[in-house]
Image (cartoon, rainbow, N blue to C red):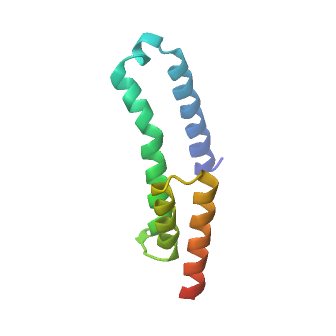
Amino acid sequence: MSTQWIAVIGTCAFAFILKFVGHSLPEKWLAHPRIGRINALIPIVLLTALVTINSVTVKTKIVIDHRMAGLGVAIIALYFKLPFPVIVLGAAVGSAIAYHFSH
């Protein structure tokens, strides 16, 4: 078995154990206001990190390219509180137009 498969299986086992422990915690521990605030912020932080990494990096280098135009369109659409599909399509179109004119 290769090292990659061992890493995949280990990660799956860790994720399962983490989910099992999360469901096994007493409800009074999770009802604490601080835990509620932290749990509300975790998805926001993870999504922000994902968008940032995928928008400005290529392998290990920071690159400013057509994806930043798409991100800019998405930020403007978010500011105007447009529906999510409009935000995604606007970002894709903005990125595609910038890519077309840069190549």
Q: Nearer the viewer, residue 22 or 12?
A: 22
Q: Nearer the viewer, residue 85 or 7?
A: 85
Q: Quadrant of the C terminus?
A: bottom right
The spot of residue 47 in percent (x, y) is 49, 49
The number of discs equals 0
Q: Nearer the viewer, residue 95 or 58?
A: 95
- Which image quarter: residue 31? top left
The spot of residue 30 in percent (x, y) is 43, 18
The spot of residue 98 in percent (x, y) is 54, 80
The spot of residue 100 in percent (x, y) is 60, 84
Image: 21 above or below 90: above
13 on left or right of 69 = right
- Identify the residue at the far front of this view: 80
Q: Nearer the viewer, residue 39 or 74?
A: 74
Q: Which residue is located at x 43 percent, y 38 percent?
A: 42
Q: Which residue is located at x 38 percent, y 29 percent?
A: 37
Q: Which residue is located at x 62 percent, y 39 percent?
A: 9
Residue 59 seen in the figure: no
Image: 40 above or below 72: above
Q: Which residue is located at x 38 percent, y 24 percent?
A: 35
Residue 17 seen in the figure: yes
- Which image quarter: residue 12? top right
